Image: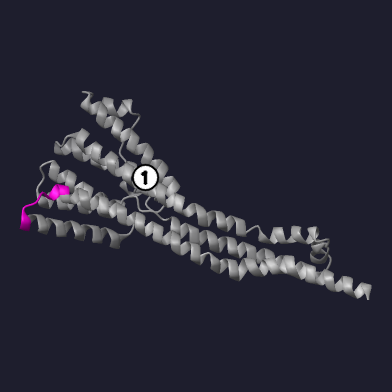
Amino acid sequence: MRVHSLSASSPSEVERSLRELAQKTERVASLLLAGLSPREAAHSAELDLQTAVNIQERTPKAFLSVVWNFALESGAAPSAVLNVCAEAFAHAAENARHARVQLSGPQAATHLVMTLPVVAVAGGYLAGYNPLAFLLGSLFGWLILVGAAFLMFLSSRWSRRMVRHAQQWEWSRGMAAEAMSMSLSAGHSLAQARRWAAQVATSFTVDHEMAQQELARCDEFMELASRTGVGLSGLLRSQAQRERNAAREEAQMRVEKLAVRLMIPLGVCVLPAFIAVGVLPLVASVISSTALNS
């Protein structure tokens, strides 16, 4: 069975999904405060929360459906829970927008670099030579052309793979802490809140190690709250925001590394292809012209 997930999708896809869901979620919360029933509010906001959602999809809507059912079953105020979700989605969408903007520079540079061999051929014609006559007029020229095409294909695949790795985005960072805070606000015990946070972390976070780290930090705040008497719910909300900030910083670091790593396919593939189709035909034409003149 194919599992769909936004947890490791590109920032643009995540941003679009999260912003739309944040707006609809906030609208449902406002309609609930205005006195509409949960079913009427969700229908008016065009947000289907009654249909069962497969949590294996690991999408924001699946998370919202789980939270919605939790609020209805636990007796928590649905409007308050939805406002928390809307705020969390909006923050995550802003982080995704930041990652998308940061990626635009390296992506544009990659597309520009891929045009270098074509520019080299055009430059040869402007210089008064005919590079294609050399490339298409002999077996050696065809071998150079095929080799250059293969290098450009390899560079394209290599660069796209690097960009795809830098695009990976965990929209669910911080949601475990948010879920635990919601559960505590609904009057659940610490044990119940911790179990629900664990369910959210394991169900909606692709990186298992990252999920365990988030739960470990929740445990640290539980211990801190029990030792000092401070409100745990507020600590968890702050921790959720710190998790989202950390996700944004990690995405920025990946983009900064990408700008350097993209030089590898440039030097290994694009530069040799540029020399093969741009420089070699010019050199051959110059030698040929010199031989004819002599």
Q: Nearer the viewer, residue 126 or 13?
A: 126
Residue depicted at x 41% and y 47%:
97
Residue depicted at x 83% and y 61%:
128
Is 222 a magenta residue? no
Q: Main secondary structure of the magenta part?
A: helix
As helix, strand or loop, the secondary structure at mark 1 comes to: helix
> Which quarter of the figure is the C terminus placed in?
bottom right
- Measured from the top left, where is residue 258 in percent x and y? 47, 62
- Measured from the top left, where is residue 27 in percent x and y? 30, 30
Residue 54 seen in render:
no
**Which segment did they paint magenta?**
227-234
- Looking at the picture, which amino acid does disc 1 mark? Ala
Residue 232 seen in render:
yes
Q: Is residue 55 left or right of 140 when viewed as pictured?
A: left
**Residue hosting label 1:** 93
- Measured from the top left, where is residue 216 in percent x and y? 20, 61
Q: Nearer the viewer, residue 273 or 1?
A: 273
Is 229 a magenta residue? yes
Q: Is residue 47 left or right of 129 when viewed as pictured?
A: left
